[in-house]
Image: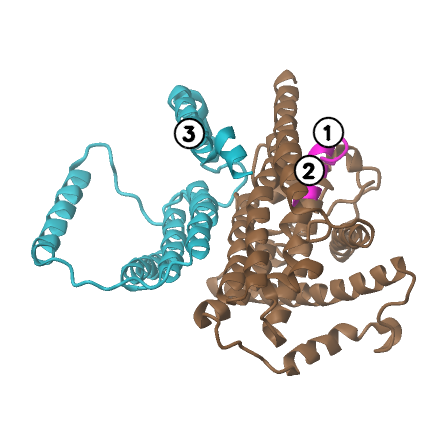
Chain colours: A cyan, B brown
Amino acid sequence: MHLILFFLFAGLCLAGAINLLLQSHPINSALSLIVVMTSLAVLYLLLGAEFLAIAQIIVYAGAVMVLFTFVVMLLNAGREERTLGSHAAARIGFPAVVAILAVLATVILRAQGLGAVHLGEGLTNSHGSSNLVVLSQVLFHELLLPFEVTSVLILVAILGAVALARRDDEERTAEK
Amino acid sequence: MTILAFVLWSFAKVVVVTVVLLMGIAYTVLLERKLVGRIQNRWGPSRVGPFGLLQPLVDGIKSFLKEDLIPAAVYRPVYLLAPIIALGCALISIAVIPFGEPDIGPHGFDLFEISNINVGLLVILGITSMGVYGVALAGWSSNNKYSLLGSLRSSAQMISYELALGLSLVGVVLRAGTLNLRAIVEQQATAGFATWNIFGGLQFLGFLIYLAAAFAETNRSPFDLPEAESELTGGYHTEYSSMKFAMFFMAEYGNMINVGCVATLLFLGGWTGPFENLIPPSDNVFFNAALSLFWFVLKVFCFLCLYVWVRGTLPRFRYDQLMNFGWRVLLPLAILNIIGTSLLLAYR
């Protein structure tokens, strides 16, 4: 059952990713990215990370991608031109990707302390046994300082965006 | 229980709940027309059936039989997809909403909830956040300036108020210590209405924030700027006709019912009665089931009446007022509510 679901959504994820690259209309690409992110969320869920799955949907599919589609709609971006790409990229690109993936896969498989996980293992249906408790222990107790530093980083980014977007008083009076 | 029995029972549950929800949507429309009619000192629909009770049926047939116009300049795939997304997101949420005691049903089968999952509340928020796409894509793909303006307003409004909506629920989650909707209700039900989150749980502020944010999230009056008739002719669904328009319409009322269900579960004690601790529990299974359904439906019904009442009473916000209210009033209040609740819980 879990295996069927895994293949279904892994296939959907890959199909979405390929469609994202092949579509020439930006809005179609954005919609394919939403499909990719939602099917990734299902894969997280199958691995027993229910909070991560829903956070993926709320944050990435629900908030980040809405902004993407917003920008595409507002700029009214037209169709992209198709180019054949350079010959060098076509020849070196695929072997390079295969090589990098192989290296990554070996490193991950060889890494110590990473055991195999069975599909649907962490999925329980009883009260209070959510991995949310463990997650919040780690985030707000053991890794509190890095977590808070990250939030400061995001705050700095927000302030920077506001400072960039804000027009000077001189500019505003000049416009009037 | 065997797999076959599980599948059959689950299928039966899904069918029954969906049919009841669709009927609920149809009759919410009638309720709104009747109540707004009375508020404006007229009768509302009264010709079809006694008290106009068959009006939803006739409306449904009407929207099916109308000519389905698709303007030439629309972007077809997205134009056709948008109403499906909107209605789908409105109907899925009911899958995680519990509306009765868990232990009623054959072989210990949970009869009053389609699926009991331990992040139920987050699932509802996630589906709500996906609901923006229906509106945004509808407006954009229609290739009409009114539609696009409506959908831009709507998306900005939904994203802004989603924050306040999510934060207003944190107080409840802090009290319950879980995201499981069943556990949240059970935690409230220890001493009748005195321990409901809105009273004994001291989440009154949270409830008011949730109420305001939910009105904006469902694009209802006084926050119905996306479909402000006087400015945008119809808003994001201007170019839709026949059943596709009806799907947006149903999505709006489905979302109203969802919001009512969530408010009932999180703040008003779910399916438990206000004096349940005083009355000795009955042994009759059917009586218990009917009682919990009665309380749940009554609470949601009151919430829907409140929706209609507000629509009949309050004028529409201006766009800058809407944004100011969301970001400068609701969001700080929600954060204050979280800080207050956590301090209180830490003190205890």
Please state if B297 lies on the left or on the right of B324 as rendered.
right
Q: Which residue is mark 1?
A: B202
Q: Nearer the viewer, residue B10 or A138?
A: A138
Q: Residue B189: percent from the left, percent from the top? A: 72, 38
- Residue at point 38% right, 56% down? A30
**Disc 3 and disc 1 on one polypeptide chain:** no
Indicate the amino acid at tag 3.
Answer: Gly
**Disc 1 and disc 2 on one polypeptide chain:** yes
For mark 3, name the chain: A
Indicate the amino acid at tag 2.
Answer: Ile
Mark 3 touches mark 1? (CB < 8 Å): no
Mark 2 touches mark 3? (CB < 8 Å): no
Up/down of B156 relative to B199, above or below: below
Of tags 1 and 2, the one toward the viewer is 2
Which segment is the magenta one?
B196-213
> Label 1 neighbourhood size at 10 Å, few (<14), some (14-19), many (20+)?
many
Q: Residue B290: percent from the left, percent from the top? A: 77, 56
- Residue at point 70% right, 61% down? B229
- The residue tagged with tag 2: helix, strand or loop? helix
* Quadrant of the image occupied by residue B113: bottom right
**C-alpha distance separating marks 3 and 1:** 38 Å
Q: Which residue is mark 3?
A: A160
Furthest toward the top, the residue is B347
- The residue tagged with tag 1: helix, strand or loop? loop
Of tags 3 and 1, the one toward the viewer is 3
Q: Is residue B333 magenta?
A: no
